[in-house]
Image (tube, grey):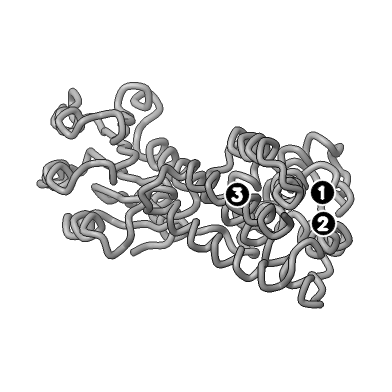
Amino acid sequence: MPSPGELLKDISAGQFKPAYYFYGPEDYRIIEATKYIARQFLPDRQIQTNYRKLNGRKASAKEVIAELSNLPMLGERQVFSIAEFQSFNPTDVERILSMLKPPDPNRVIIFSSPSARTPKKSAKFFKLVESAGVVMVEFPKLNQREVAGQVQGRLQKAGLAIEPDALQTLIDLVAGNLGAVVAEVDKLVNYKGKGETITAEDVTTVAAGYEVINIFELVDLVAGGQPHRVLQSLEKLIEEGNSPVTICTLLSSHFLRLYLLRSGKSLPPNMAWLERKLRGQANRYDSGRLEQIIVDLADTEAQLRGGDLPPRLALEVLVVGLISDRDRRHG
């Protein structure tokens, strides 16, 4: 199973496989990798006509098979992107995968699943896809080194430098999310002039809204027992492009910070600018309750990735439950 980095090297070298399955918590990277393969495999004049995008929640297996059966004129290349592939039942998955044989050197098929609906690796779905010879690529969150490279590379192209403390603050804020890196670096590029250096204050002024500040405000509303405003805050975060899984992960990080502070620990130096606000919030909970919230968030994240409830509803149930629990404890 190649890593996203190894996939990039192969594609950049012109080495393509007949079929891929992309999955993992990084939806933005999956979308970008799919588009990159299409641009690299197809000549410019064929992008509009020979790049076909289908969605398993909207198209039937019959429609997908019909698309895969159509051959282009004059042996031109084709790329098919089939998102939400996990939506098909096992029989339809097998029928679609049978279209991979024999392999066609002029065609690349990219199957994918969003983070919130990716089946478990132990599920029959994964075994069916792997047994068909599909190249499986998991897209995890970026690690700190990868985020630093992305940030510095994008800023360098824009003619900007960044102080070490500012870089670390930005790394913490984006939480390994490439989509957040792109959005927040763009804000900083528009905020500063070419040739200037970005400071930690610039980051907290311009880019902090992505994770820590918005999540802080959401938790503040939960602690204050304001369900209507909590749901409004969730709506805003989702409208800004954050998936329920991402929001749940950010909440987990936030409550872990509160637990550390409630237990007498200090946050890393790069988070010192937020520690005073977080301490006040941490004092609204006891350590035992924070431990239980962290466990509940982990359970909810598992539910978001493969449970019966729609991801957004599962998240709303969690946060409203936190409010109800608070009211019971303080009633």
Q: Nearer the viewer, residue 213 or 12?
A: 213
Q: Nearer the viewer, residue 299 or 129?
A: 299
Kind of residue sitting beneath label 3 = Val
Where in the figure is residue 285, as x and y percent of width and height?
74, 64
Q: Is residue 42 above or below residue 161?
A: above
User: Which image quarter: residue 123?
Assistant: bottom left
Q: Are marks 2 and 1 in contact (CB under 8 Å)?
A: yes
Where in the figure is residue 188, as x and y percent of width and height?
78, 41
The residue mark sitting in front, 3 or 2, is 3
Q: Which residue is mark 3?
A: 319
Q: Is residue 276 above or below residue 229?
A: below
Report helix, strand or loop for mark 2: helix
Q: Is residue 78 above or below residue 251?
A: above
Q: Which residue is mark 2?
A: 166
Residue found 32% across the figure and 37% down from its top:
81
Quarter of the rendering occupied by the C terminus: bottom right
Total marks shown come to 3
The residue mark sitting in front, 1 or 3, is 3
Kind of residue sitting beneath label 2 = Ala
User: Disc 3 versus disc 2: distance between alpha carbons?
Assistant: 31 Å
Which badge, 1 or 3, comes first in the chain's sequence? 1
Residue found 74% across the figure and 54% down from its top:
170
Which dot marks residue 203?
1
